[in-house]
Amino acid sequence: MSYESNPILDKLPEHLKQFIKPQDYSGYTAIDQAVWRYVMRKNVDYLSKVAHTSYVDGLRKTGIAIDHIPNMYGMNRILKDLGWAAVAVDGFIPPAAFMEFQAYNVLVIASDIRQLEHIAYTPAPDIIHEGAGHAPIIANPEYAEYLRRFGEIGCKAISSAKDFELYEAVRRLSIIKEAIGTPKSDIEKAEKHIEELQNNMGEPSEMALIRNLHWWTVEYGLIGSVEHPKIYGAGLLSSIGESVWCMTDNVKKVPYSIEAATTSFDITKPQPQLFVTPNFAFLNQVLEEFADTMALRTGGIMGIQKLIDSKEMGTIELSTGLQISGNFETVIEHNNKPVFFQTTGPTALSFHGKELIGHSTKQHYDGFGSPMGKLKGINLAIEDMSPRDLKAYNIFEGQTITLEFEGALKITGEIITGTRNLMGKIILITFRNCKVTHKDNILFKSKKALYSMAIGEHIVSAFNGPADLHSFDLVTHQITETTIKPSKDVQRQQLERLYQQIRDFREEKNTTISRNKVFKEIISHHPNDWLLLVELYELAKMNPENGREQGFAREIRSHLETVKRNNPKVGHLIDDGLELANSKTLRV
């Protein structure tokens, strides 16, 4: 696999690069291009009236054209001036990874495009949603900073095992729902499975809560006043159906607040209510308010317990700045404070995000445990002791000592050395012939192997992922199901050829094509197709003084009425296309 990199993408860690795929631009058919063109023409026409002013300005600044699907690595040449970049991925990726990309100022763009049959809306992420929805708004500096900051905080949110199960279920639904020919029963079964998962998630994790904030802002956000809001959420900007629906009184408008974090959503249905932020700056205010509730900032017994419950790799940071990264298995508490913790499997120790020499996963390959907190009967924490204090309590090299912590934790052994941080605080004490006990239980015992005890009075932070990305091999993601590429029968290939002929005619690459012949072939062999007829109608209306062209336009319109009667679901799409074709403001 290869892709065109740039200075921003060069800074991505390897575990994020594993999600990147090349954008196969040659794989887009003329039908795909027509779908993009229709949606973008409709969006620019309608959204110029109801979207935040940053949207239309952003289309220009990010180099997104109406007439053709963007080459995202071509977009990068323009995005770099905004301090951003874009990468292609295959559909949904794990939420933590998605947010971490944002933290590096990288837009994740699903390079597939929705099928013509789902032109109004698709639950699957596609290049219309990502490229035409997310990208333009980042031209607004305040919003771009919100997106980056959201990613920075969001990727530290602690998940639950059920979160990943829900992610996999949503990914699968998006794939099969977008694929042509999926039996209705399979889609209904997948939707029911998601509904069951959502109803049995238990206490929502941090990731579930912050994902709600993401949905009600980045995806489905409104801005301005509740009475007269504008659209800025990418899900609304990329859906020609919901962008209209959300502006009606059928959708309740609510002032944006931290309450959005506890408001769930259903990806399979239009949203019954939306949140309205007064401005982009207020988004950051609510985000910081939410971050104050996360274990990232609160730490403590609840923080480490969240990591244990998640069964995923995480990190705790002690008050000395020492960070322990691994899969946390056990915590012993006393007076609602942790006095001992234990990881299982490979564990690494770091300080300020940098792994400590001699404390990699090779040294702690089967876990790491340590007492923590205050010594019993001594008000001064070990980390706050001066060299004179430490000597007074016999805590120095060469001494065999028993340290009794609050909570009935004891450690006995010969002190070999201590490790200090840059501020002079001791963060580790290394023992030989060591034994750690809790009441009558032996937690650790070793004669020859050295044992390092973590120093820290309390846990100041607990978050998802390792402190130092280089400590672990994170290039392990396995996608269980990939997007389904539609198979092409002879009829489909013929239809693509007709679309390409009209595209070539409009772009003056081949003006010898008989549009009337294409029209007759559509009627005879593709009677349900409507989008190419709309494009033919548009071309006929481009020369209003030519009577022959106007007669051709009337003939096309007459047949489109037949298509609408046979398939009422596309009636409003046809009407919108005809209205655009008759518009002078969007004629290209």
Image: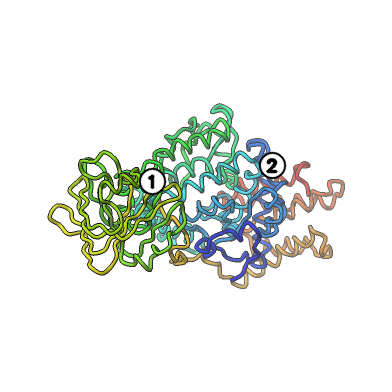
Tell me the amino acid under the disc marked 1. Ser
Give the secondary structure at mark 2: helix
Q: Measuring from the top left, give residue 296's x and y in whole percent.
A: 41, 45
Q: In this picture, is 565 found above or below 29? A: above
Of residue 171 and residue 358, the one placed in the foreground of this image is 358
Q: In this picture, is 17 found above or below 146? A: below
Q: At 58% across and 42% down in the image, what residue appears?
A: 145
Of residue 379 and residue 222, the one placed in the foreground of this image is 379
Q: At 71% across and 45% down in the image, what residue appears?
A: 580
Q: Is residue 434 left or right of residue 461?
A: left
Quadrant of the rendered image containing residue 138: top right
- Crowding near the residue tagged with mark 2, few <14, some 14–19, many ≥20 C-alpha atoms within 10 Å: some
Give the secondary structure at mark 1: strand
Outermost residue, bottom side: 490
What residue is disc 1 on?
461
Q: Which mark is residue 56?
A: 2
Q: Earlier in the sequence, mark 2 or mark 1?
A: 2
Q: Is residue 299 left or right of residue 572?
A: left
Q: At 30% across and 48% down in the image, what residue appears?
A: 390
Q: In this picture, is 108 found above or below 494? A: above
The answer to whether residue 58 is visible is yes
Of residue 10 and residue 358, the one placed in the foreground of this image is 358
Outermost residue, right side: 545
Q: Which mark is residue 236?
A: none
Q: Measuring from the top left, give residue 269's x and y in whole percent.
A: 46, 46
Q: Measuring from the top left, give residue 69's x and y in whole percent.
A: 68, 57
